[in-house]
Image: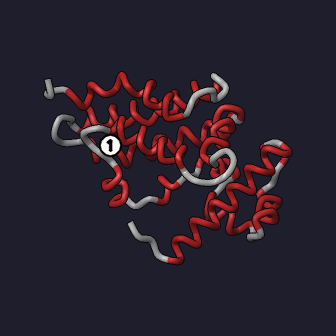
Amino acid sequence: MATGLRERWREKARRTIQECALDLFDERGFGAVTIEEIAAAAEVSPSSVYRYFGTKEGLIVADEFDTMSQEALEELFDREDPVGTMTRIVRDYEAAPGGGEPVPWRRIRYFFKEPSVRTAFCASLDRASLRIAPLMAGGRLTETQARVAANALVFGYFAALEQWYLDGGTRPVAAYVEEGLSPLRPIWSVGDQ
């Protein structure tokens, strides 16, 4: 999936802003940092931060899924194995090159430490469910079943992340996602027996 130079530049800018914000949040606390301070640290204007993320909470919850086209999502998503899709995505994050703790996992603790971030993340999960449900409908699942299954999948992912956080991150996130979502697998294997 090739991307243009402008899109790669935007993605790099988004990552830089997000990493600078996380550095400041880790150093001083989420509530003590302003958008203006984040912009200064990332060497961008505050309007750029607002344009890319909308809010301070948006800085934490934003990821590649938010900017992914529906076509790219369809390519990524295996309607026969949504649990495998989620687990594969998480494993890819964990295997990403680079030093230190990967940005997605640095962000997780804020989902559970900051009530406003938790609320923003739940809203993000709801939007994700709305995007995924049509990919599940048809075949084995009705539209209603697809909507319920999509919510079970994305909010099950949330619960797995929370358990990882509560356990102190002792195992890879993907292990929690795989274990936590495994009870959902029969939804997609009905009729395979």
Q: In which quarter of the image is residue 114?
A: top right
Residue 97 or residue 3, whichever sits in front: 97
Residue 73 drawn above or below residue 13: above
For residue 14, side relative to residue 45 (left or right): left
Residue 53 or residue 102, whichever sits in front: 102
Q: In which quarter of the image is the C terminus?
A: top left
* Residue 176 screen position, x and y as percent: 50, 28
Question: Please, which colouring scheme is shown?
Answer: secondary structure
* Residue 139 screen position, x and y as percent: 16, 40
Query: Is disc 1 surrounded by few (<14), some (14 to 19) or many (20+) residues within 10 Å?
Result: many
- Which residue: 63% across, 38% down? 108
For residue 18, side relative to residue 63 (left or right): right
Amino acid type, callout 1 = Ala
In the current view of this chain or complex, which residue is farthest to the bottom? 5
- Which residue: 64% across, 67% down? 13
Residue 101 drawn above or below residue 66: above
- Which residue: 52% across, 27% down? 159
Residue 6 or residue 101, whichever sits in front: 101
Residue 90 or residue 21, whichever sits in front: 90
For residue 127, side relative to residue 17 (left or right): left
For residue 177, side relative to residue 146 (left or right): right
* Residue 78 screen position, x and y as percent: 29, 45
* Residue 53 screen position, x and y as percent: 62, 58
Q: Quadrant of the N terminus?
A: bottom left
- Which residue: 54% across, 43% down? 94
Q: How many labels does the image show?
A: 1
Residue 4 drawn above or below residue 120: below
Q: In which quarter of the image is residue 51?
A: bottom right
Q: In which quarter of the image is residue 151?
A: top left
Q: What element carries label 1?
A: helix
Q: Would you name the residue on which mark 1 appears?
A: 133
